[in-house]
Image: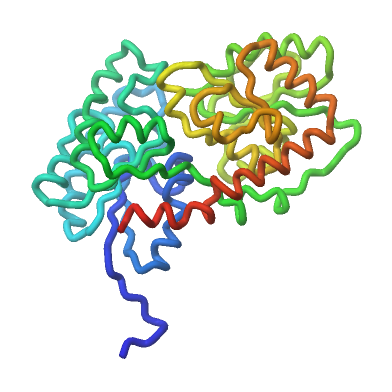
Amino acid sequence: MIPNNITILSHKILFLTPYPDQEASSQRFRFEQYYTLLEKKGYMICMRPFFNKRAWSKLYSRSFLTLILFTLLGFVKRFVHLFLDIRADYVFIHREASPLGPPVFEWVLSKVFRKKIIHDFDDAIWLNDPDEKGKLKSKLKWKSKVSKICKWSYKISAGNAHLAQFARKNNNNVIVNPTTIDTETLHNPVLFQKTEILDKKTVIGWTGTHSTLQYLEPMLPVIEKLEKLYDFEFLVIANINPNYELKSFRFVPWNKQTEIADLMKIDIGIMPLTKDDWSEGKCGFKLLQYMALEIPAIASPVGVNTEIISDQVNGYLCDSNEEWFCALQLLIGNHELRMKLGKLGRKKVLENYSTISNQANFLSLFE
């Protein structure tokens, strides 16, 4: 007879990730926030990052030698990882086992060790990132390996339908596993109530990394035009200051500790994108963050954005600068409309993109 308070560890899951635990948003909001759920279900979890915390802090430095040293160290560690956790039942690989070169580690895991690989990705990683096109870095990433990893995998965890369509060319066992939001203990507006100030400036906001700042560039003429009519603030939350020459511009460095409080300063959240195959692979994370916090959102009608936002119902989809201008102008001057859209936006996230609503779907990856 087994006592009720004893948990039986039936399976072990090895997570092979690019970055250390609780640092990268793609990892935090795709699978790390499900660790507790997996443990409650009896799984033993082991996480092995390619880059350690020290390497992560130096990853975007300009020291080429430092980057080479940390990358070489990552390859050595990854080789050791193969044997440290050889008894794992599942190997969950986020994006790829190594950032450069052919899929050697994936081949060994699949063909030699016969492991059940679950391949997870939330970008069109088989394509060149727009800011890497034509660079040596792109060639070293060996983009063609994505198809092979898909083929060798037990299951594919794709962030949206567009990514799933690509994966199905090489594997029929594909599950659309969206990026999800912890709407209870993190992205919950009740925990971060705004202080309503009647004469406070309306804040148009955007959050992202240096690699996605490029999508803001076409928006600058729209912001400049709005500045001639309204007194508002244009807030950018990122890891690098773009130093826009706009009178409304304000920059806040991204900080994990203040992430939600900083987002709560935004009254209107924006997510512009370009129309291309790379953008089709985006999973709408910015939108989900805004909407979960009851921040009305405006986005380009590209990819999964059109599934998250129902135009003029829980947000706005804008295809041209004129449409962006009109939508922003409407929301700047209408506090009640912003409140209405915000509540409907959070409802959409709760029902379709929250960790709670996606639990059974996520667990199905390990069945």
Quadrant holding the N terminus: bottom left
Q: Nearer the viewer, residue 200 or 243?
A: 200
Q: Nearer the viewer, residue 78 or 199?
A: 199
The residue located at (48%, 34%) in the rendering is 283
The residue located at (66%, 11%) in the rendering is 321
Q: Is residue 327 visible?
A: yes
Number of numbered labels in the structure image: 0
x, y (%) of residue 270?
64, 26
Q: Residue furthest bottom?
A: 1
Q: Is residue 269 visible?
A: no
x, y (%) of residue 312?
70, 29
x, y (%) of residue 4?
40, 84
Residue 247 picture quarter: top right
Vertical position of residue 25 compared to residue 116: above or below: above
Side of 183 where 107 appears, left or right: left
x, y (%) of residue 340?
77, 39
Vertical position of residue 61 compared to residue 92: above or below: above
Side of 330 where 319 appears, left or right: left
Q: Nearer the viewer, residue 276 or 245?
A: 276
Quadrant holding the C terminus: bottom left
The residue located at (44%, 57%) in the rendering is 360
Residue 233 picture quarter: top right
The residue located at (64%, 19%) in the rendering is 318
User: What coloring was used for the rendering?
Assistant: rainbow
Side of 18 where 308 appears, left or right: right
Side of 140 where 165 appears, left or right: right
Q: Nearer the viewer, residue 325 or 132?
A: 325
